[in-house]
Structures are given as structure tokens and as C-alpha cells.
Amino acid sequence: MCGIVGYVGYRNAREVLISGLAKLEYRGYDSAGVAVRTETGLTVRKKAGKLANLVADLDQDQIEGTLGIGHTRWATHGLPNDRNAHPHATEDGRIVIIHNGIIENYLPLKEALQERGHTFRSDTDSEVLAHLIEEKYAQEDGHLERAVRAALKDVRGAYGIVVTHVDHQEIVAARTVSPLVMGVGEGEMFLASDVPALLPYTRDMVYLHDGDLVVLHQDGYHITTLDGTPVQREVSHIDWDAEAAEKGGFDTYMLKEIHEQPQALTNTLMGRLHDETGEVRLDITLDPASFDRVHIVACGTAYYAGLVGEYLIEQLARVPVEVDVASEYRYRQPIVDERTLVIVVSQSGETIDTLEALREAKKSGARTLGVINAKGSSMTREVDDTLYIHAGPEIGVASTKAYTSMVGAMLLLALWLGRARGTLATERGQDLLHAARELPRLVEESLTPERVAAIEAVAAKYKDARDYLFLGRGVNAPTAFEGALKLKEISYIHAEAYAAGEMKHGPIALIDASLPVVVIATESVLLEKTISNIQEVRARAGRVIALVSEGDVEASRHADDVIVVPRADEMVSPVVNVVALQLLSYFTATLLGKDVDKPRNLAKSVTVE
Ligand code: M6R
């Protein structure tokens, strides 16, 4: 969690820091702060709230310097106020630090430091780092790199840390768990938690590994392990278009990303589906015969993509699949051995719950596969194989295009396994290959101005509801779960989701005339049963919003409102159906005046347990 930017070079550091932090606000926006090395010392400015508050403060009183560090915070320890904002300085103001992560043993460290005379000015775990480094700096005869290394030996936990000292035109940074990437320029060096912060300045990046410590000067850098052994890390050239990370004419990143789904799906699917041979090619080393069961592990939206994956893999490849939320998986002692394939699904590739679950599974000898968006992320470095979803940078906190691309990737995997294991009949395989190929077009059709306007009208009609219920069956039960999550995340309306057949076992008691019930009633072998569920809702005066396939006459007859989506093969329909639910949530939230790109209490990438 949190975003970090560092700069040393010849430019105005303040500008580099602010433009970088603006790109990282998706990682947290409880407060923001910078420290710049000026002619008079290290000047720290920090403000609670979004980056705009800090910018307004800086605009009143400019700070000039060519070295600086900046932070945008997602609070873990201590309220999101000015004093807990980063950077944190020593009492004499000669050392400043920024920290992303959690120092697990900060309490005993803090008590010991207080006994030795240090006064703390925040409630954060991070501040111990400033005081520890100050002590080590004195013990190491004013050598900042050695001081940071010595201090980190005393701490336990996760960190991406950047440090600077008033007497040194250098930044020292280190990481364990929390991500840090270094940008290499000419006569300047950069650091950030994520690549988009640096793209305006350089495309040459070095991804720091766990346990790396780097010293940055204007003219270069050197990397060592925490014990001081020099290491070389590859410089990767990034070819993303910087524009790709901007809003591109849409009001919000979320809306832009919803509309990018046809392109994202094209990137996920194409080049992997081969019509001539009917093959799926995944460019992974995984042997389809090397496992007898599959565990899918993920969080949030990625978990729901995993549930769709379970359905598809079991149906098409006939391998038993279990799906777990990552935060539970590692603690429930799952039965994992060398014949288990563990698939981690993640947009960021940095979600700590998923990363730790992966590590746990590896200890038991599992084969591992990542279904991941972010290139070079921690998970991609730890799995045996990565099936990149290629959705492009996703900035909106509410995941949209990453979800549909994850489901697309799950479909590819299920088709590939079904083919390889001989469980998928040739003709059905060809049909599904064709259906997969059609997905970008079908999603494009879901996004015509007429369809979008129709969904906006439904959102307007129900926007003042206090609660919502979402129902779906079979492969679209996860679509209902994801629809409810999206609505909760960005509109703050309470929403629950159930497999439609489960409604009568309890949730039916909630139904009255004030409860909108979204029912996924698109083309399916279970459609008749879903219509019965709709009637059960109607019989209790519930208001039904039915999601139906184009040309439907049956389900629509029983609904108060209808959202029509393009007709798709049931096995690929979760991709098409969820788009309508994304838009329903989007318009509900914007009509209620919510900030959909930065919903309260959330962060794009959750790198604390
Ligand atoms: O980066 P990841 O896919 O691992 O993130 C997992 C969840 O934190 C994420 O999907 C979260 O639920 C989103 N806010 C959903 O919109």
C-alpha cells in the first residue's frame, strides 16, 4: 500500500515528485507529503487528504531543490492526519524517511528508542525507521548506506523504504515485499512504487527484488543485498504508451477502463487462439498431465474470476478445482503436494495475501501458475509460469478490464487443458474457440451509446435504494458476486449476492418492495429455473431488474426493468454480462456524487495483510 517517488538529478524535484504521486494516488490517498533537499536543509511538507491538499500548500510557498522523496499514504498505523503523513524526520530534521509496508516489531523498537531518549511525533510504525537510522548513522561514522543496512537488520516486516540525509546528495532505498522500481535517466535517477509514475521521464526501469538495497546518485546507482553483496539487476525497457495510463477523454479512469475492455480482451485472447488448427497456445512450460487437482487462490474481484475459472476448468478439463480467498488459504492447511497446480490470480501481482499464499503452496511442492496483469510484479517472479492477461495498466480502484481479461485467460486455460487432457470434444472445442474469439466484439456491442444510456436510466431509477440483491446461477453466480462487490465498492450501497437457487434458503426474507433484485437471466440451460427464482421475488413484491439476452421474451415478461445484453454462449457469457453490471454500479455511484476512481477506505493494490 502507499505510493513512493524519489528523485535525484537536475530537475525541480518538487515537480517530479508531484507528477509521480499523482500517478500513484490509486495506491492510497489518506495523506501526501514530500521532502526536498533545499539550500537551507531538508524541507518537509505533508498534508492529510488527497494530493490536491499538498499541492495547494506547496503552491503558496514553493520549495526548490534537485533531490526529493514523496509519498501518498494508505493508513495502517495511526489516523490519516498531518502528523502521521510521511515523510518522517528525525528530531533534528537531518534524516527523512518514507516507508510503505508494516514494521511488525515496531512497538518494542519504539519503546527501546524512547528509553534511549528519542521523541516520537507520530503514531506510525514507520517513524521508528527514522530514529533507528539516526542511531546507526552515528555508529557508522556518517555513512548513510551502511546506516540504513544496519537499521533494517533490526526490523521485521514488509517495507519499501527511501531515505535521505541533509549532508548527502543521494537516496538510499530498500525493499522487502513492498514493490519499488528504479528509473534510469541521463544525469538523473528515479524511484517509484510503480512504473506509470516514471514514464514521463524515462522508460528504462530496474525492478528491485526482495532484499535489495540501492543507492541513487545523479550519475548512477549501485545495488546490493541487505548483507552488502553487490548484485546486478536487468534494465527493462518499457514500451507502454504513457497515454495508456491517462483518462483518454473519459471522465474517470473507471469509465475509460470499462470501455477499454474490447481491446483488453483482444490482447488477452488473440495470438493464443489458432483457428486453423483449433489450438490454444499459451507459451507456458506447464505440463497438463503433471497435476491431479487445481487450487485457485486470489482476493476480491480476482477471486470471482477464479470462481468462473473453477467452473470452466471443471467443465472442460474435468480436473477437480478448489477456489480460496488467499487470506484464508494459507492458514487453513490446504492439502497440497507436487501433483497440485496452484493458480494465483491477480491484477497487480503484488497483493500480499495472494503472494504469501503462493509462497505457502510452493513450500509443499506445488506447481504454480500466475494469471497476472502487472509485468515484472512480485508474483510473476515467484511462479513457475505466468499467463499474462495483457489488460494494460488499470488505474481505477474498482477493477473492471482486469476482471474480464482474467476470465478470458481462465477460458483459454480451460480450453487448453480440455484439449490436452482429451476431455473436450473437438466440435465443442471449436465452438468455444469461436465464442472466445467473438468476445471483444460482443463487449463492444455492450458498450454502444444506446445500451449505456439504458443502463444509466435503470441506475437513476434505483439509485436511492438502501440495499441491493444480486442473483445468478452456474457460471454466472460469480458474475452476481462481482456485480454486488462493484456496487458496494463505489456507491457504498449495501449489496448481497447469492446463487439464485440459494435465495429461498434465507435471503428471501429480505425481499420487499424497497429491494431491487438484479437477476442474471441470460441464455442458459438453467434459464427456466432462474425465471422461477424471479417469480419468487415478484411474489414478495421485490423489484426485479433482469439481465437478459438479446431477443429474450420469457424472462423479460416477469421483470420490472430489463437490461438487454448481447447473446453469447453460456460458457463465455460471464465476460459479456459483467459489463452491464459494471455500468450499473458506475452510474449509480456517479449519480450519487461518489468519486469512483478513489472510493473511500480502498486502495488499488493491497500490500499489507
Ligand atoms: O491486484 P489484485 O487483483 O490481486 O487485487 C485483488 C483485490 O484487492 C481487488 O480485486 C479488489 O477487490 C478490487 N478493489 C476490486 O474492484
Image (spheres, rainbow, N blue to C red):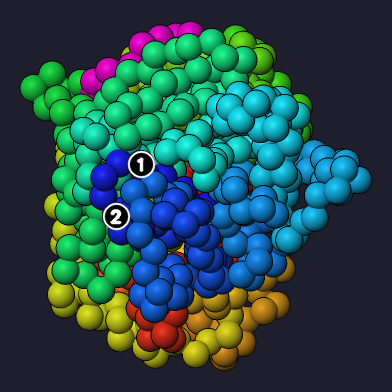
Q: What numbered label is drawn on residue 376? A: none
User: Residue, x 13% and y 19% (percent of image)?
Assistant: 277
Q: Residues within 10 Å of mark 1 (few under 14, many from 20)?
A: many
Residue span colored magenta:
280-294
User: Residue, x 53% and y 66% (percent of image)?
Assistant: 46
Q: Is residue 417 magenta?
A: no
Coordinates of residue 467 in the picture (x, y in percent): 58, 80
User: Front-most of 413 and 197?
Assistant: 197
Coordinates of residue 330 in the picture (x, y in percent): 70, 31
Residue 193 in the figure: left or right of residue 195? right
Coordinates of residue 89 in the picture (x, y in percent): 62, 53
Residue 41 in the figure: left or right of residue 207? right
Quarter holding the C terminus is: top right
Q: Which residue is mark 2?
A: 12
User: Residue, x 51% and y 40% (percent of image)?
Assistant: 167
Q: Quadrant of residue 576?
A: bottom left
Task: Report, in whole angstroms, how far the alpha carbon at label 2 lies from the one at label 1.
Answer: 9 Å
Residue farthest to the front, as pictured: 40
Secondary structure of residue under mark 2: loop
Secondary structure of residue under mark 1: strand
Pointer 1 residue Cβ closer than 8 Å to ligand 1: no
